[in-house]
Every structure is written in C-alpha cells, then in structure tokens.
Image (tube, helix red, strand yellow):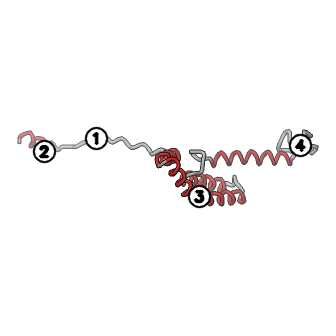
Amino acid sequence: MMPRARRCRDLLADAHPTLCFRHASIARRSENAEIVTAELITRTGEFRTFTDLNHALGRLFHLFATKRLDRRSAHTLAYISQLLLATLPGTRDEAVYARGNDSWAEHLRRALPPPPPRPVATPLRVRYDDQAAKQKENA
C-alpha cells in the first residue's frame, strides 16, 4: 500500500511474497535498522557514561567487521559517538549539580556490569611431618 491508500502496481519481488522490489528493499532496510539498534543498546538504554559509549562502539565495530553495517552508516555512528564523548563531562556536571553525587553514582552503577563473583577461599591444609608432631607432643 502506498501513502494515499493505493496499491503499488509493480511486479512482486522474488525475495518477498507480497511486496515489489522497491518496497521489499525499504522493508529490509527497516528490519536491518531495528536489528542494529537492538545491538547498540546499552545496559542503561542511554549514552550518558563512557561505559555506555564504549559498549556501543564495541558493538559498532563488531557490526562493521562482520559486514552487517555498511561503511557510511558506521562512519556516521562513530562520528555521533565522538560528539557524545565530547559532551559527557558537561552531562555529568549537570547531573551532579541538579541531583547530587549520589544520583550520578547510582547511574554509574546501572551502567557498569556487575563485578565478577569473588572466588571462595578454601582453607589451606597444613601438613605436619610425623616427627615434628611427635616432638610437639613430647615438649
């Protein structure tokens, strides 16, 4: 369907059961954009910390390296990331001024991945020589 509720008169595309080639390619780009967006989303869903941007840039690198994102889009997103990086100190200052250090610290806790669990310490087994043990008993 076209915007004025008319049907497209082009032949159906081989790759799509109901759309012409032009509309199928538009639909495919839209689906691709949704997939890329889902992969670039950070833990907080925002880009307000260096960790958020680092995560998004890492995913951007992966998408470009696996050829799931074209060069032009990757370049544009990297440039936007550079602009966001330049504004982060101001964003932090505003948040601290408006809400205090505690709110910024809480935001950072949400942005950072949880720390890995600490290994459980096992007690050391001390081996005594039989002779040393006997000497202690005799002393």
Going from the N terminus, do you reach mark 4 or mark 2 first?
4
Going from the N terminus, do you reach mark 2 or mark 3 first?
3
Question: Relative to residue 31, is residue 108 drawn left or right?
Answer: left
Callout 1 amino acid: Pro
Q: How far apart are the alpha carbons under marks 3 and 4?
A: 47 Å
Going from the N terminus, do you reach mark 1 or mark 3 first?
3
Q: Name the residue under label 4.
A: 12
Q: In which quarter of the image is residue 123?
A: top left
Q: Residue at x 70, y 54 (%)?
A: 69
Q: How far apart are the alpha carbons under marks 1 and 2?
A: 21 Å
Percent position of residue 15, x then y: 82, 44
Q: How far apart are the alpha carbons under marks 1 and 4?
A: 72 Å
The residue tagged with tag 4: helix, strand or loop? loop
Q: How far apart are the alpha carbons under marks 1 and 3?
A: 50 Å
Q: In which quarter of the image is residue 89?
A: bottom right
Q: Which residue is drawn at 89% across and 43% down?
A: 12
Going from the N terminus, do you reach mark 1 or mark 2 first?
1
Q: Nearer the viewer, mark 4 or mark 2?
A: 4
State whether residue 130 appears in this view.
yes
Tell me, for residue 123, which label it has, or none.
Answer: 1
Say if mark 1 contacts mark 3, CB within 8 Å.
no
| Residue lying furthest right | 9
Q: Residues within 10 Å of mark 3 (few under 14, many from 20)?
A: few
Question: Relative to residue 39, is residue 133 drawn left or right?
Answer: left
Callout 2 amino acid: Ala
Percent position of residue 47, x then y: 59, 51
The residue tagged with tag 3: helix, strand or loop? helix
